[in-house]
Image (spheres, helix red, strand yellow):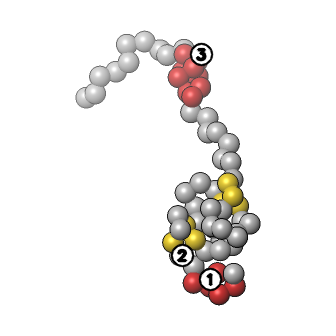
Amino acid sequence: MPPQPKRKVSRTRARKKRSHHALGRITPMRCSTPGCEGTVLPHQGCMVCGTYRGRRFLEDAADEA
């Protein structure tokens, strides 16, 4: 059997522990590809030009751009 808590953790103490768990706001960035005006979220590919970190991942977007 696992050990049990010795005392009750108060509501305030438990909520203080979780005070740092809130997520921050994600800021969209401009696409780093020259000539592309698209905005991308961090660690995501650009759906306008079809690139991620300088490499193409969408073949359809290459034909349109």
Q: Are marks 2 and 1 in contact (CB under 8 Å)?
A: yes
Q: Is the N terminus in the top left, top right, bottom left or bottom right quadrant?
A: top left
What's the CA distance linking mark 3 and mark 1? 55 Å
Q: Which residue is mark 3?
A: 12
- Give the amino acid at mark 2: Arg
**Mark 3 or mark 1: which comes first in sequence?**
3
Which residue is pictured at 64% across the width and 39% down the height? 24
Q: Which mark identifies residue 14? A: none
- Give the amino acid at mark 3: Thr
Q: Quadrant of residue 22?
A: top right
Which residue is pictured at 61% across the width and 39% down the height? 23
**Mark 3 or mark 2: which comes first in sequence?**
3
What's the CA distance linking mark 2 and mark 1? 8 Å
Q: Please, which residue is most extreme toward the front here? A: 34
Q: Which residue is mark 2?
A: 56
Label 2 CA crowd tier, 10 Å (few <14, some 14–19, many 20+): some
As drawn, 36 above or below 9: below
**Mark 2 or mark 1: which comes first in sequence?**
2
- Give the amino acid at mark 1: Ala
Q: Which residue is mark 1?
A: 62
Q: Nearer the viewer, residue 25 or 50?
A: 50
